[in-house]
Amino acid sequence: MASHGSLLHHSPPPLSIPTKYFHPKHILSIKPLKPTTTFSSFFPCSLTITQRGSCSPLIACSSSNGRSSNELVDDDGVKSVEQLLEEKQRAELSARIASGEFTVNQQSGLPSILKKSLSKVGVPNEILEFLFGLYPKIPEAKGSIKAIRSEAFFIPLYELYITYGGIFRLNFGPKSFLIVSDPAIAKHILKDNAKAYSKGILAEILDFVMGKGLIPADGEIWRVRRRAIVPALHLKFVAAMIGLFGQATDRLCKKLDAAASDGEDVEMESLFSRLTLDVIGKAVFNYDFDSLSNDTGIIEAVYTVLREAEDRSVSPIPVWDIPIWKDISPRQRKVTAALKLVNDTLNNLIAICKRMVDEEELQFHEEYMNEQDPSILHFLLASGDDVSSKQLRDDLMTMLIAGHETSAAVLTWTFYLLSKEPSVVSKLQEEVDSVLGDRFPTIEDMKKLKYTTRVINESLRLYPQPPVLIRRSLENDVLGEYPIKRGEDIFISVWNLHRSPTLWEGADKFEPERWPLDGPNPNETNQNFKYLPFGGGPRKCIGDMFASYETIVALAMLVRRFNFQMAIGAPPVVMTTGATIHTTQGLNMTVTHRIKPPIVPSLQMSTLEADPSMSISDKEETGQKGQVYQAQS
Ligand code: HEM
């Protein structure tokens, strides 16, 4: 499942990434901003093209940790046929892009004809260059997208960015999109001139599930709802949520205990999806899905709705808009029934919460929180928020989706990255042992788990959720040196920004150490919009602190108790896209109970020594603790 991103949240996450417009049937074209660095010289080793089925190439992240393609060689130094095919395809694609096959001639079109005509009648070249150079045209691309690739659409966008630069236009049949991968232009759109941009196609895709919820909403509705909802995520609420994160992760630990004892492999992506569903249900409307233990109708319904939102974001034709289709398509009937069940459940929870608020004695204040029900819904109702039930339902649904798949995807890709870097896992375990020992994490621990936080920061850099942010211009504007018109659909590729070889050293390497332990927590402001894990400007994520702590707690509690490895014989981990970045076949891992090493090598200690909050007695205590780590229950 996916979600926050593309469809979901981020709008592309819901973000929904209207990947529907990237269907292979559509036509794509491009033209170089700065011709042209060879594509192959920058192609990230972390992305390899693999064959899926007979003809549909995919990007695999099997070497997404900065390893070179030499590592596709097996132990005997022999490359498999699949690997050779991948390399050949990649080289061919590089050569085609470099040859200008996808490039629209900048001299084409009316301006070029006019320029030629004026030249013929004797207008000097200097004057022509002056006249026509005044209005630079955004580089454009053309060709068949099928020629480039058919899945995980943000990957071809990376290749095109490397070739064509920080802003270019893609034409898909009658549709046209601007692809932005330049930090200054991203900052202009998201922050400096944010009022001139809406969520555009994202709102259209998400309408059936989020209505006018905070992610798709624009204008006055967005302003009013944002002002009402943001205060609900105050510090006291987030602190209370740390306990919830710990309890939910502990349930997951118990499930993994059984797998570790039985020697069974586990599919971690779906377990993370369940973990974060349990967390967000309780946090947003005080509902315990308990999806780690149960598979009740409501859980199935939530997944049906989420899956539909994802699928709509990648569907070439909006069949669901055909009125009769809803009634005759079994799939659409299932979606309608699931949506009704989820909506009825939410309406019921709203009614129950209203009764609780009516009966309670508590006075509403800035950091108001009901101890029995600290949920966001309770806060909103207690605040006297003057809102219709439909709007409230849209907001709850939006937060359910926004807060669910994003966090699950972050954990999935973090564990994938860690499986390639045992030295990072050792440092992580060392820190968690020192700071937490065997107890549940508290809000005070969050600032002490510095290396754990850096691992999440770095995971969010390499796998941003969602990988693309969507906007539409509401008025004429200027992006960089290019004037644009009202009505332009724009994709800001966070993936490109986060992996740009010109913005980052070792861009495709997983290196939590790139973020100094004693430096500020990296965000869009201190990284000047080259790092946008939670967006930026007025539409920045409202759940950033919540989500950061949720993933830190889950990561810390899991690595202190278990070791995780890629399961032997598991299918390769291949990316696909919905709202967020998913795997095509899950993250299959072998989990074993962790046996604490008797001696901690001094080299692995060095980073931790930079943490002034860690006392020597903490380390000594850790050194003496027992063999098998069990979290408190
Ligand atoms: C690691 C987890 C998360 C990530 C990576 C993430 C990322 C993002 C990003 C990038 C945006 C900006 C979208 C855009 O500009 O188009 C966003 C917006 C949003 N996020 Fe999150 N998010 C996460 C968790 C959450 C959680 C837990 C919640 C709710 C409690 C949440 C609620 C929202 C909402 C409501 C918005 C829309 C804000 C607005 O438009 O005013 N997110 N998120």
Image (cartoon, grey):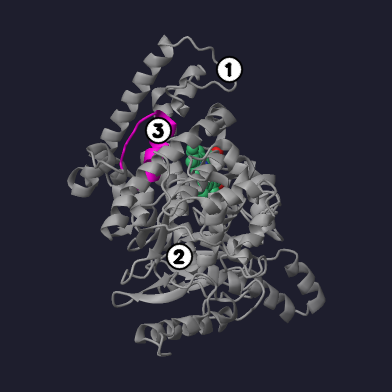
In whole angstroms, how far apart are the C-alphas of marks 1 and 2? 46 Å
Q: Is residue 399 magenta?
A: no
Q: Is mark 1 within 8 Å of ligand 1?
A: no
Quadrant where the image shows the C terminus: top left
Note whether residue 432 is visible: no
Q: Nearer the viewer, mark 2 or mark 3?
A: 2
Q: Quadrant of residue 100?
A: bottom right
At x 53%, y 28%, the residue is 232
Q: Nearer the viewer, residue 535 or 470?
A: 535
**What's the CA distance linking mark 1 and mark 3?**
22 Å
Query: Is-magenta flag for residue 282?
Result: yes
- What's the mark number on residue 539? none
- Type of amino acid under label 2: Ser
Residue 60, given in percent of the width and then of the height, sits at 42, 71
Secondary structure of the residue carrying tag 1 is: loop
Q: Which residue is mark 1?
A: 365
User: Could you classify mark 2 by the number of other residues whose Cα lies within 10 Å: few (under 14), some (14-19), or many (20 or more)?
Assistant: some
Q: Which residue is painted at 33% across and 56% down in the image?
A: 317
Cα–Cα gap, marks 2 and 3 = 30 Å
Drawn side of residue 154 relative to residue 261, left or right: right
Q: Name the residue beneath numbered marker 2.
A: 419
**In the image, which disc is placed on residue 282?**
3
Q: Main secondary structure of the magenta part?
A: helix
Which of the pair 259/364 is nearer the observer?
259
Is 286 situated left or right of 123 in this image?
A: left
**What percent of the width, then of the height, locates residue 561?**
43, 52
Residue nearer the viewer, 143 or 228: 228
